[in-house]
């Protein structure tokens, strides 16, 4: 297990360092999420790996729009690879949209 601090500074896909301009993918997630946690470990069996998504907080606009997790990435290339990996997971991630946030 990684600490929240380690996860927060890393690209969820390549584990490279995140820059100030974080991009990533907001996604719905059909499995249970622990609302008291900051990050959720998400197994991706089709890609044979586990990634971490930031849990979108109660009361945020993204949550009301149907997003549950935000996967932060370091680059457009990682965003695209992640998007393809999520798409392979048989509908576990129903909605995906690129997101950009200033850290
Ligand atoms: Zn990356």
Image: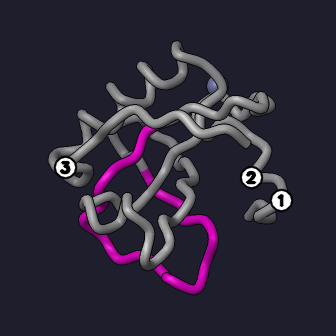
**Residue 13 or 79: which is nearer the viewer?**
79
Q: Which residue in the structure is indicated by mark 3?
A: 94
Q: Position of residue 90 (x, y in %)?
A: 17, 45
Q: Locate residue 58 relative to residue 92 in the image: left or right.
A: right
- Asked if the residue at label 3 sits under 8 Å from ligand 1, the reply is no
Q: Residues within 10 Å of mark 1 (few under 14, many from 20)?
A: few
Determine whether 54 is above or below 103 in the image: below
> For the point 38% across and 63% down, which residue is it?
61
Image disc number at residue 8: 2
Whereabouts is ligand 1, in terms of quadrant?
A: top right
Q: Which residue, given by chain and number where applicable, does mark 1 sit on?
A: 5
Q: Quadrant of the C terminus?
A: top right
Image marks 2 and 1: residues in contact by CB distance under 8 Å: yes
Q: Residue 22 sits in which quadrant? A: top right
Q: Quadrant of residue 80?
A: top left
The yes-or-no answer for disc 1 within 8 Å of ligand 1 is no
Q: Which residues are magenta?
A: 25-43
């Amino acid at each position: 297990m990684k600490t929240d601090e380690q996860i927060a500074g890393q690209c969820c896909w390549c584990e490279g360092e995140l820059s100030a301009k974080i991009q990533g993918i907001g996604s719905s997630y059909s499995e249970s999420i622990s609302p008291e946690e900051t990050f959720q470990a998400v197994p991706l069996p089709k890609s044979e790996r586990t990634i971490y998504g930031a849990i979108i907080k109660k009361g945020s606009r993204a949550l009301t729009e149907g997003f549950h997790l935000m996967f932060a990435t370091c680059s457009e290339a990682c965003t695209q690879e992640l998007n393809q990996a999520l798409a392979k997971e048989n509908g576990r991630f129903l909605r995906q949209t690129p997101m950009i946030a200033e850290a």
